[in-house]
Amino acid sequence: MTKLRQALAIVDWSGWLGAAIVVAMVGAAVLAPWIAPFDPVAVNIEDRLTAPDAVHWLGTDQAGRDVFSRILFGARASLAVGIGAVLIGGLIGVSAGIFAAYKGGLAELAVMRVVDAVASIPLLVWAIAIVGVLGVGPVQVGPLSLPNEVKIVVLVGCLFSPVFARVTHAVARRVVSADFVKARWLQGAGHWAIVTGDVLPNCLSPIIVQATLLVAIGIVVEASVSFVGLGVQPPAASWGTMLSDARNAIYSGEWWLPVFPGLAISITVVGFNLLGDAVRDLFDPRSEARTLVA
Amino acid sequence: MSAPILSLSGVTKSYPRGGMLGSVFGARAPVLALDDVSLDVMAGDVVGIVGESGSGKSTLAQLAVGLTRPTAGTIRLGGEDLGLLMRDHAGPWRRRIQMAFQDSSSALNPRKSIGRCLEETLVLAGVDKAARPAEAAALLGRVGLGAEMLPRLPHELSGGQRQRVGLARALAMKPDVLIADEPVSALDVSLQAQVINLLGRLTGELGLTLLFISHDLALVRALCRRVIVMRKGRIVEEGPCLQVLESPRDDYTRLLLSAVPKGIEGRRRPPARTSNPEFPRP
């Protein structure tokens, strides 16, 4: 317990701010049905385009829907895509990167060239092209009917995997050649034990930093895909669709329509970035020594 | 006693030049790291292997423990072909030969406490779970460290302490043969003496067979009974330590000796001050 407290002592205010933002956003997404003051899809023409006031804290949109409630529900789509895509991409990419670094030789060459090939096409182009081809309807996988969001999570996850693969490969190459890995090998430890016990833990800090950065990018990708109409389908709320709907309001004076979803995206992205920096410091065993010395 | 515990016969190791593409398009001759080396090490021997950088000392060490396979020739451990033994990766033969590494900061996993590092070694050495904590503490005691080191992480130890933990880890497998690849060249002089004394004591107490690889002739003289001089992948001279170092027959050995600064004529103990001479390339 004291060890944890010592470790946490190195987290500075920006790390705590990042953690607070992320916790708040995740909390908002999870608790949206209970804390949202209004139904996010309920149309109320009489109250349309009201400026922020005591009833509608962040105003209402063209259909009279409460912007605050829609942002809370929109956090679900944004965070689901951001976090889900990072988990999928991390699983694929980290496995591929470690496999390539550990195996070496032709396998390494083959895996990393495939990674290069996938990474050579820009993320958004991939996303829009594939969703465009597959369409925005639900996907039928056996007995399951998966909504469009799942398609985007898997797709963005696959597109993230080369980034993870490269980062992991770069650091794992160094770890694999370290003497402690050779020592384990000489003791007769198996590949799996070496990879999970010695290689992976020493690759984690750049992977985690990358993961938090990619959550932020995932949120932006979801917003972008939804903005062009290929993501979350109306009337469901997402920050991207809200921005898209707000395009025309920018010139007609309803400033709250683009500003608040835009702020939500920006704050969440900054929050994940700050958290990423703090987590990287936490995972560095040497940074602990710094506080013990100081 | 008659059969050698470790024997190399006609061992050659070559690396392709220019990486993988170089080996495919093989325009240039491969690099010969070890060229037809034969060597017998008897049980209980303390053998020093000296030579300049690139002479093949470390390649020899890696081949002997099975980290790489020879291009040609056979290596026998206790009379059995290492190539055949290696088919059983985690076989009991692993306990017969272990290695201590040069760079103590790379030799220990920075995320594992000393205790965990030793205990997971003891798992593979076949020690019962209940006996492991006591055994780990005993191993640390053997290398002159206290049990208070067990919960620490490698970065909380000094280089000399880490090097001794590395030795303790190798000893945890209860090896017959220990290969120490430049175990002290990354340490400062007072720590070098500690580790050399420790190695000397361990070979005496445990009857350990030691291959001590070094470029520091003074340390080899202090520790070893027999010395092998290597150059460009070949053994140029071998024999009893005193004989080779006092009256070398080979020109290269003479050159190595003349490169050692004057004033370190200590015999059976490490000198108070040593240096790491840069051997001139002939």
Image: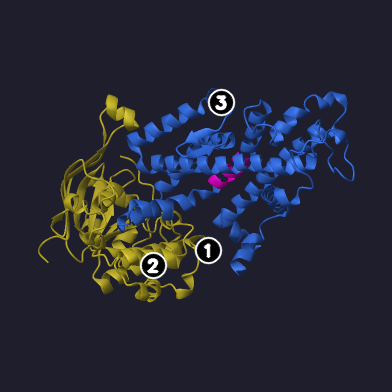
Chain colours: A blue, B yellow
Depth check, mark 1 against mark 2: the one in front is 2
Query: Which residue is disc 1 drawn over?
Result: B156
- Observer-nearest of B45 and B260: B45
Q: Dividing the picture into quarters, in which one does residue A77 lie?
A: top right
In the rendered structure, find residue A135 and report the number of the disc placed on it.
3
3 vs 2, front mark: 3
Residue receiving disc 2: B119
Horizontal side, residue B66 vs residue A202: left or right? left
Q: Is residue B182 above or below residue A44?
A: below
Q: Which is the main secondary structure of the residues drawn in magenta?
A: helix
Mark positioned earlier in the residue sequence (1 or 2): 2
Label tally: 3
Distance between mark 1 and mark 2 Cα atoms: 19 Å
Q: Residue at the location (39% across, 42% down)?
A: A99
Q: Position of residue A51 (x, y in %)?
A: 88, 36
From the viewer's perspective, tell me whether residue A231 is left or right of residue A61.
Answer: left
**Crowding at mark 2 (Cα within 10 Å: few <14, some 14-19, many 20+):** many
Residue at the (81%, 30%) spot, across then down: A62
Give percent across and percent down for residue A158: 50, 35
Disc 2 is attached to a residue of which chain?
Answer: B
Which amino acid is tagged 3?
Answer: Gly
**Range drawn in magenta:** A207-215
Q: Quadrant of the N terminus of chain A?
A: bottom right
Q: Are marks 3 and 2 in contact (CB under 8 Å)?
A: no
**Amino acid type for the residue under numbered disc 1:** Glu
Secondary structure category for the residue under label 3: loop
Q: Residue at x 35, y 56 (%)?
A: A184
Q: Nearer the viewer, residue B34 or A189?
A: A189
